[in-house]
Image: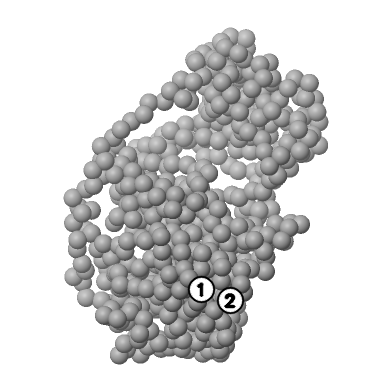
Amino acid sequence: DYGNCVGVPTLGGEVDFAPGYTGNPLVNAMCVGLLRESDLTLAKAHGVGNVLLAMGSSTGRDGIHGASFASEDLSEKSEARRPQVQVGDPFTEKLLLEAMLELIQQRLVVAIQDMGAAGLTSSSAEMAARGGVGVEIETDKVPTREPGMTPYEIMLSESQERMLIVAEPDRVAAIQAVCAKWELSATPVGRVTDDGLFRIRHDGVTVAEIPGHRLVDDAPIYYPDAIESPEAVERRARRPSNPPIADARNALLLLLDDPSIASKRWVFEQYDSTVQGSTLIGPGGDAGVLKVADTEFGLALTVDCNSRLVALDPYEGGKATVAEAARNIACTGALPLGITDCLNFGNPERPEIFFQFKEACRGIAEACTAFDTPVTGGNVSLYNESPSGAIDPTPTVGMVGLLEKLSYRVGSHFQQAGDRILVLGDTTGALGGSAYWSTVRDFVGGQPAKVDLTRERALQRFLIDGARRGLIRSAHDCSTGGLAVALAEAAIGGPYSTAGVGIRVDLGGYAAGVDDIGVLYGEDHGRVVISCRPDQVAALALLAAETSIPLFDAGEVGPAGGAVDLAVGSGRYSWAVDQLRHTYFSAIPRRMSHVDEDRAAA
């Protein structure tokens, strides 16, 4: 609702379900903006005597202690301490965004920062610390919407749609005029000082004063013990003892019905994915793609995480999360540029949790170094625990890529009957931490597959070069659920396609010595399913040789509405594509008590 009102398209995301999220659900959002370098404005206060202005909505008691509440273990007693939840006003936010852009374009502000966690306290202290200056806040001048608010409440309020501006005194009137045009207020509430102090005054009385750097730069650094739990080590060494609840054929139906794998159309159809008219590839594929106005290039965006892998092996799981995001970006033909992350973990005071945190960060850092994708920002959310236990470690990675020309873009789904289907990368049939073991064997454990970052980087080059040369018709990452799920998803088609397509695939020569289950549902990294015209196979094989990427010619795309036929060793498996579509698209609506129907096919 918020994004729709503000007018920001929602291009995709990640939806995952696990028991730990029931008591502590996570919502992470990545917002990507575009600016000219000359318009870059920093949150760095400077200029002694410059004015601090509170811009936007007035200040209430909502969200007080919200940041500290987020950093405690939830228990039965937590409800009594729950702060008043902030209520967002997207229409005011839209006005605020437009006003801020106008102020920046007119060069009216010295610095600007939003009032997020801890509200006016954090925004003013952080801006002052970055600039090496002090600030003085007069809380009695802050516009409030509730009577009798104390300086303490005003400074810690987390009311939404507020910004803090630093401006030269002779620019205040111009700033207020721009804000008035957008029906917003911009009220002077303080000034920049040269004494390095963070000072709060109310009705002329100093009520708090502390060296500013103590709040920002002098926070204590802790070195907690990082010890992997014996249970985690033992879980990695185990294999499932439960018999499978389905054979190899019916396992695919169970996996496509798993809400973590099934289509998220029920979620993203509630969002506007085409507002602003720049969407080239919308939700339901590997990554969304936006065109950049008045240019030939576009931006690809994705958000990824596999918390099950991170829980089993935090280091490899951290690497795998970045690698999957990069594969998704490269599948569109775009070059991975950088990431932001949200590191969601339990209580770091517990050695086993801090071990997860430390090792996942190490894996993310190693992958980002290998891919030349800097971490431009992010946030950390700790203490995600409830009486039912901690969440699985969930380091969510959002990645942005550059599509050099709009014509290079590649979709995720098979396009044309007669096209060849190629599998990039090989498999050992790794089932540790797999969706197959979790869904079909009711077991979470085993050693997840290792990530070969050199191979992943080469695969990215293959996909990007292939897209630039017009050799690839479709490309879909092979990850959760393995090769069978990737092939099925590519055949099922996009969320608003009217029908899927049949495919005929023979994997008999793909992985010698690997059984049918391993070939179909193993989750080795570094694999992608692509399609191309028959006359392009030779060129792609040459490109694969140049980049040292294994390439297997697996089959061909059939007509619309046919069957998905897979041959693996001595096994032959077939599903009507309409059955796969129904299972895939209806899984979440059925559980949400909505009509169990594939409307696109109806």
Q: Position of residue 48 (x, y in %)?
A: 66, 16
Q: Give the number of callouts.
A: 2
Cβ atoms at labels 1 and 2 below 8 Å apart: yes
Mark closer to the chain start, 1 or 2: 2
**Disc assigned to residue 553:** none
Image point 34% across, 45% down: which residue? 357
Kind of residue sitting beneath label 2: Leu
Q: Is residue 52 above or below residue 236?
A: above
Q: CA distance from mark 1 to mark 2?
A: 10 Å
Image point 22% across, 75% down: which residue? 243
- Residue 485 seen anywhere in this rendered image of the structure: no
Q: Is residue 200 left or right of residue 39?
A: left
Q: Quadrant of residue 206?
A: top right
The residue beneath circle 1 is: 543
**Viewer-side residue, 388 vs 258:** 258
State which quarter of the image contains the N terminus.
bottom right
**Viewer-side residue, 409 vs 499:** 409
Q: Position of residue 393 (x, y in %)?
A: 35, 50
Q: Is residue 133 above or below residue 402?
A: above
Q: Is residue 108 above or below residue 226?
A: above
The residue beneath circle 2 is: 471
Q: Position of residue 354 (x, y in %)?
A: 30, 42
Q: Residues within 10 Å of mark 1 (few under 14, many from 20)?
A: some
Q: Is residue 393 left or right of residue 528?
A: left
Image point 61% across, 72% down: which residue? 469
- Residue 312 seen anywhere in this rendered image of the structure: yes
Front label number (1 vs 2): 1
Kind of residue sitting beneath label 1: Leu
Q: Position of residue 151 (x, y in %)?
A: 55, 20
Q: Residues within 10 Å of mark 2 (few under 14, many from 20)?
A: many
